[in-house]
Amino acid sequence: MMFGRKRVLVTGGAGFLGSFLCERLLADGHDVLCVDNYFTGSRDNILHLLDDQRFEVIRHDVTFPLYIEVDEIYNLACPASPIHYQFDPVQTVKTSVHGAINMLGLAKRTKAKIFQASTSEVYGDPTVHPQTETYWGNVNPVGPRACYDEGKRCAETLFFDYHRQFQLNIRVARIFNTYGPRMHPRDGRVVSNFIIQALQNQPITIYGDGRQTRSFCYVDDLIEGFVRLMGAPDDVTGPVNLGNPGEFTIRELAEIVVEMTGSRSEIVSRPLPQDDPMQRRPDISRAKQVLDWEPKVPLRDGLSRTIAYFDGLLRRHGTVEALAAAPR
Ligand code: NAD
Ligand code: UDP
Ligand code: UDP
């Protein structure tokens, strides 16, 4: 057996981030077990990995117990976009909370190291800018985003309680907005929406006045951060912010996408969703210090790769509606 080769479980492995993580772990020589219920993920995302003898897939919902033998667990299972996590909010809470309990129980029994994909949403609509890990956040516990925000906050609590109570080896990453190929074309996130709208010369929908900000990390940079966090010394539990500190208004993003696609789209305004955070930018000092990590891919480079991906999809399927109807 190769030195350092591990059996690694990736929950949510057929999703956007999960599929890139599975690919990376296989490239690093590990055996990878992908668990997904295909709520927002798709077999298309992992089709290219199926021929690899070291890759295994189980259709399973993490809200139910799972008894397998593993060395490491990356817990990514959870819908990530507002449209998808608000579609069935109770299931979103169950996925975050029961899913975390089951994966922590599995880690406890197998003595596996366990990573949690947490989120910048734990900071809510932040009153501290940029956000540091020591900031406790500003979350509305009863609003439409709460199923996701509070679910993820409770999962963090569970991770730290299992760590203190049962000495579990935990890693908690707070992920800021990440984009790239294989984002779900209809999950309503801003980067995929704007690119698909621009490529079809349809109106670019800015919610509110477009002055709200986000910081966009390219997927390759993020996955490198995941692997470094998992490989860091055992006292590095996190939480660690992972994201790109470059901050853009949503209007700026719209203008860049229109320019890069050479689109004839006009920019239109739509109502701002309730509790939409006004500003977001990670302070990544901790990640720099403990992981020697920082993003390398500038926004325009990442966008051009993402535009090429969606352009390819649209050329194959015609429209986004046909794409959505196609078997995935
Ligand atoms: P995604 O929707 O593409 O992936 C989530 C995956 O989890 C999908 O494959 C989905 O089918 C699966 N899933 C959902 N519920 C499940 C359940 N109950 N059992 C098993 N599988 C289930 O989203 P993503 O962007 O790849 O996000 C992955 C993780 O990273 C999520 O936990 C998300 O909260 C977190 N995250 C992502 C971002 C981002 O910008 N992409 C930012 C912060 C946090
Ligand atoms: N669990 C699991 N796989 C395992 C071990 C546990 O899915 O290999 C689940 C199990 O359903 C349990 C949960 O994880 O309810 C939490 O496990 P823990 O050992 O912490 O709790 P207990 O079993 O004592 O309730
Ligand atoms: N947004 C927008 N138009 C869209 C989709 C999103 O203006 O078509 C805005 C949204 O209101 C938010 C930002 O873009 O202010 C990021 O939205 P996304 O859903 O991608 O992520 P999140 O709000 O979870 O950071």
Image (cartoon, rainbow, N blue to C red):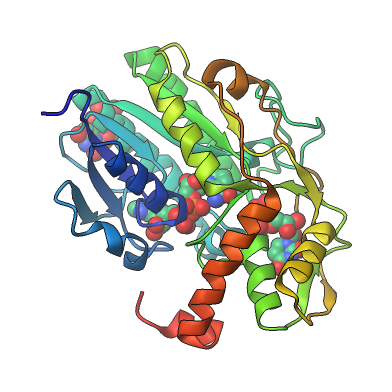
Front-lying residue, 61 or 288: 288
Q: Residue at x 51, y 45 (%)?
A: 220
Q: Residue at x 35, y 29 (%)?
A: 114
Residue 188 relative to residue 80: left or right: right
The image shows a total of numbered marks equal to: 0
Asked which quadrant contains residue 201, the reply is bottom right
Furthest residue toward left: 1
Residue 251 relative to residue 173: left or right: right
Q: Position of residue 129 (x, y in %)?
A: 81, 32
Q: Is residue 42 visible?
A: yes
Q: Is residue 65 visible?
A: no
| Picture quarter with ligand 3 | bottom right
Q: Quadrant of the N terminus?
A: top left
Q: Position of residue 35 (x, y in %)?
A: 28, 50
Front-lying residue, 228 or 104: 228
325 over 283 or under it: above or below: below
Q: Position of residue 79 (x, y in %)?
A: 48, 55
Residue 13 relative to residue 29: left or right: right
Q: Position of residue 171 (x, y in %)?
A: 44, 25
Q: Residue at x 77, y 59 (%)?
A: 253
Q: Quadrant of the C terminus?
A: bottom left
Front-lying residue, 283 or 24: 24
Q: Residue at x 56, y 66 (%)?
A: 187
